[in-house]
Image: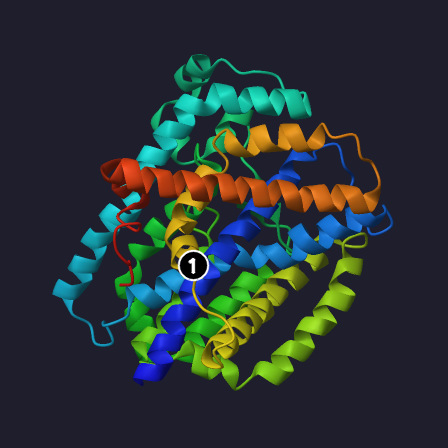
Amino acid sequence: MSKDWTRIESETIDWLRPVMAFMVICLHVQMFYVDEHWSMSGGVFSVFVIYLCKILCTVAVPTFFFISGFLFFRGLQDWDTDIWKHKVKKRLRTLLVPFLHWNVIALIAFPLTRLGGSILKGAPMDNVWAVIQDRGFLRLFWDRTLFDGMAYETTNLFGWRIPSGQPMDTPLWFVRDLMVVILFTPCIHWLIKKTGACFIALLAILFVLDIWIPASGFGIKATFFFAWGSFFSVKDKHFVESFCKMKIPDTLLLVVGLVFIPFLWDKSGQLFSMAVRVFIIIEMVFFFNLVSCLIKKGKTKVNRRLANSSFFVYCAHMIIIASAVMWAIMSIPFHTGFMRSFLFVVGAVLIFLICHFLSILLERYCPSISAVLTGGRNNKKIDS
């Protein structure tokens, strides 16, 4: 790999981390508007949320999976069991340890978070201990939706039900699924070596059609994007260089998707979901092309503080902070579509900044706690 492309690739990843974390916050902000019926004919605010949260921001977590796959197999082009063991042990510190701690924090803070939800959404308060006794303590680390007495699921075009769910700290379903797919990395490496792009193409088709094993925690989204990122490292390729070759057709497809996909929302939920899954692939390539091009031309630089705090922001924002901010935002008496759209973004920005500054304070005054909660990400760069 050429050193220049390696630098651009690394800086592109770091530049996109906080952007994708902010997109995840936007996805969760719209969850507080439970009384809204989103429709393309429902006014400015409704159209704004459909574009932002139902289409654009859906690229965030898949991008994290892609980056994780690429970084995991960097330096592992040829299989080496000792290197693989080292990487897995490293993930115990960077993934499992934060995952356990954040979910315990979320469980402890749950009554306060639920209070915010009760105020904002009129949801009934739960007796946490009663729920734990009824459904089991360990299960709460796997699927938080058990608190609601149900597990979420999607139905694909074939009518098959694909379960999904979140642990106590809602955003950490990404870490949960990532840890599961890492268990299959020997198989992923072997299949990439033996079949190359054919394996990735098959996973892409399964992802678009939402066909996979019906098991919560082992999803096709994690498997496909992690494997796609892995492909470039195993084959010793630069993904930013490869994506750059398709920037013109990809940009055209992006524009076409933005024009036509929103209008599927009111017509067919399944067709809309399938179109969005195709769009995620297109949008991810577009973002990598855009950022890498700006970095290559010296038009932008990585903000290291934002990049380093992105994992903390991702993990922390749904624990009390989002509820508190949205309670304040939604109590502001502005009802025009443009103003509600503006306040939506303001709420997301405030949540991001509060978490970002908490990360800085924790790193400065409680570095040992910061190291545990971030898996060491704030102390040094995690890149392999």
Q: Name which residue lies at 39% across and 54% down.
A: 305
Q: Is residue 94 left or right of residue 305?
A: left
Q: Name which residue lies at 32% across and 80% down.
A: 235
Q: Nearer the viewer, residue 62 or 20?
A: 20
273 versus 102 height, above or below: below
User: Which amino acid, mark 1?
Assistant: Phe
320 versus 83 height, above or below: above
Disc 1 secondary structure class: helix
Q: Is residue 373 left or right of residue 161?
A: left
Q: Name which residue lies at 30% across and 49% down.
A: 378
In the rendered image, residue 124, in percent from the top left (x then y), is placed at 61, 17
Q: Nearer the viewer, residue 384 or 351?
A: 351
In the rendered image, residue 104, in percent from the top left (x then y), is placed at 35, 28
Q: Is residue 142 visible from the viewing direction of this image?
A: yes
Task: Give the number of callouts.
Answer: 1
Q: Is residue 157 left or right of residue 371?
A: right
In the rendered image, residue 227, in percent from the top left (x then y), is placed at 39, 66
Q: Which quarter of the figure has residue 88?
A: bottom left
Q: Nearer the viewer, residue 59 or 201?
A: 59
Q: Is residue 211 visible from the viewing direction of this image?
A: no
Q: Which quarter of the figure has residue 380?
A: bottom left
Quarter of the image that includes the C terminus: bottom left
Q: Which quarter of the figure has residue 2?
A: bottom left
In the rendered image, residue 102, in percent from the top left (x then y), is placed at 36, 35
152 versus 243 height, above or below: above
* Colouring method of the image: rainbow
Q: Nearer the viewer, residue 192 or 76?
A: 76
Quarter of the image that includes the N terminus: bottom left
Q: Name which residue lies at 62% across and 53% down.
A: 156
Residue hosting label 1: 65
Category of crowding for the residue at label 1, using alpha-carbon neighbours closer than 10 angstroms: few (below 14), some (14–19), many (at least 20) = many
